[in-house]
Image: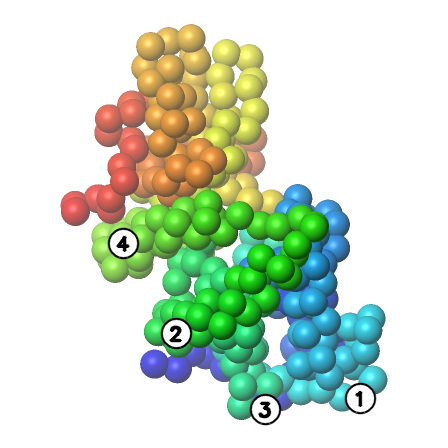
Amino acid sequence: MAGTRVSNLRLTKVVDGDTVKVELNGEEESLRLICLDTEESRAGSGKPVTHAGKLATAWAKGFFGVNEDGFPEAEVFVDIEFDTSDPLAEALKKHRGNFGRLICYVHKDGVNFNVLAVEQGWSPYFVKYGRSRLYHHDMMRAEAVAQARKSHIWDPATNEGGETRDYDDLIPWWHLRDSVVEDYRRFGIQRGVLSVRVDYATIVAAAENEERITVLCDLQSGINRWAGNGAVIFAGSIQHKFNLWIPEIDSEVSQRILNLVQLRYAGRGRSYVYITGVVEDYRGKPQIVLTDPSNQFSDVPPGT
């Protein structure tokens, strides 16, 4: 299967090893390269800045033929490819991350940069938000090649004496999350489960009518705010605001909900959970009130 593709876009900047910018429809679009998570080359993300991250950024700039500041000195053109074959207008809406960036593959001169970056050892095969639909086997093979060669991030000497990332901890957790996303893709979507990012307009409309819905939520960050006698979970994003509200936190039922969130889903837990309930509009944001840990939380799609 081939994904929706846009060809011959002018590259405007290489930001780092997994983020570039292109000109699309007369505007500059930031691209977050799917299934990549190169190490950091600049502070500010909350992740450690590493030598491997700086090298990955330099390698990406060399691959795309830009200067040290990331800007092309001559015109550079690339193709982008989305991970589904939806019509372009739909793909441009569907494949956007929490910060509005397009999530896609980038091809230059017939080379899939995403796969090559993994094969060269600049990034693990990053499945935290789900595996590649188009290039899963290519990505698996590419990661195996890099590990067999102990290339870059797989060689402890690359970051020796500096900051590192703990892949022994991260990779099993990413694959746990990926298994949940695969269940959602295979069974959840056809059973009407909504995604906060993809189906946000549907969730907002359901809130206006106070409908009962099921939403796949990412609770990695756990409880985000304590308010009065309740607790709030920000289950959406900056672009897609959606909250879960736990009332009367001193009650026995609410304590069970808090325990479930903090012990099973937050941090390095399962993260994803199917939440079912009546969604309502609360101060301009859709919200589900959590009052029943047995019937509102599920690790599998409804009907499974």
> 15 or 206: which is nearer to us?
15
Say whether residue 32 is left or right of residue 292. right
Question: Residues under labels 3 and 2: Cα distance?
Answer: 21 Å
Q: Earlier in the sequence, mark 2 or mark 1?
A: 1
Chain-order first, disc 3 or disc 4: 3
N-terminal of the pair, mark 3 or mark 1, is: 1
Residue annotated with mark 2: 141
Q: Earlier in the sequence, mark 1 or mark 4?
A: 1
Task: Give the residue type that dot 1 points to.
Answer: Ala
Query: How would you rate the neighbour count of disc 4 (Cα within 10 Å): few for under 14, some for 14-19, many for 20 or more?
Result: some
| Residue receiving disc 1 | 74
Residue 111, quarter of picture: bottom right
Residue count near mark 3 (Cα–Cα under 10 Å), binned few <14, some 14–19, many ≥20: few
> What residue would you read off at disc 4?
183
Disc 3 from disc 4: Cα separation: 35 Å
- Asked whether disc 2 touches disc 4, contact meaning CB atoms under 8 Å apart, the reply is no
Check disc 4 and give the amino acid type: Asp
Q: CA distance from mark 3 to mark 1?
A: 15 Å
Residue 259 against residue 26 in the figure, above or below: above
Residue 109 - label: 3
Q: CA distance from mark 2 to mark 4?
A: 23 Å
Residue type indicated by callout 2: Arg
Front label number (2 vs 1): 2
The residues tagged by marks 2 and 1 sit, at their Cα atoms, a distance apart of 34 Å
Which residue sits at x=81%, y=78%?
67
Question: Quarter holding the N terminus?
Answer: bottom left
Q: Residue at x 45, y 79 (%)?
A: 4
User: What is the distance, in whole Å, between disc 1 and disc 4 at their CAs?
Assistant: 45 Å
Mark count: 4
Check disc 4 and report its element: helix, strand or loop.
helix
